[in-house]
Image (cartoon, rainbow, N blue to C red):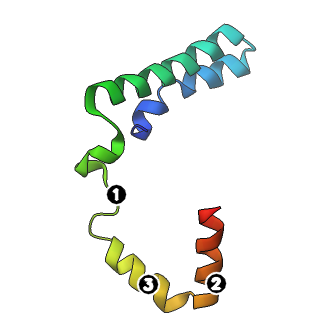
Amino acid sequence: RAPEEDWSAGLPLVMRGIQQQDWKEVINGIVLSLEQTENYEQQRGTQDSDTWHDRTVGISEPLRKGVNKWMPEELMALAERNVKK
């Protein structure tokens, strides 16, 4: 939905809240992460709509060749069936 730096913004607050058993701090951390994610989507759209967030650029073809070379067809078919479920 949003880059990791946005949705993980509240994790330090959550961790500190858990360590100190301060549940209000935990809630604040969760809310911060949700707000950051929501703000990102409102301002820029989904992460998929940004071409610069596409982490497969330049590696999709070599990755496909590598997987085809080292993974047997029946194992690949099994993996694809499990992903579709």
Mark closest to the chain's N terminus, 2 or 1: 1
Horizontal relation, residue 83 to residue 10: left or right: right
**Front residue of this view, candidates 74 and 64:** 74
Tag 1 secondary structure: loop
Q: CA distance from mark 2 to mark 3?
A: 14 Å
Q: Position of residue 60 (x, y in %)?
A: 35, 72
- The three-letter amino acid code for the residue at tag 1 is Arg
According to the picture, the residue beneath numbered tag 3 turns out to be 66
Tag 2 secondary structure: helix
| Mark 1 burial class by Cα count in 10 Å: few <14, some 14-19, many 20+ | few
Residue 72 showing in the rendered view: no
Identify the residue shown where x is 43% and y is 28%. 37
Horizontal relation, residue 22 to residue 67: left or right: right
Q: Position of residue 47 (x, y in %)?
A: 35, 42
According to the picture, the residue beneath numbered tag 2 turns out to be 75
Q: Is residue 83 above or below residue 23?
A: below
According to the picture, the residue beneath numbered tag 1 turns out to be 55
Q: Position of residue 66 (x, y in %)?
A: 44, 84
Mark closest to the chain's N terminus, 2 or 3: 3
Identify the residue shown where x is 53% and y is 89%. 70
Q: CA distance from mark 2 to mark 1?
A: 25 Å
Q: Which picture quadrant has residue 80?
A: bottom right
Q: Which picture quadrant has residue 31?
A: top right
Tag 3 secondary structure: helix
Identify the residue shown where x is 34% and y is 28%. 40
Is the C terminus in the top left, top right, bottom left or bottom right quadrant?
Answer: bottom right
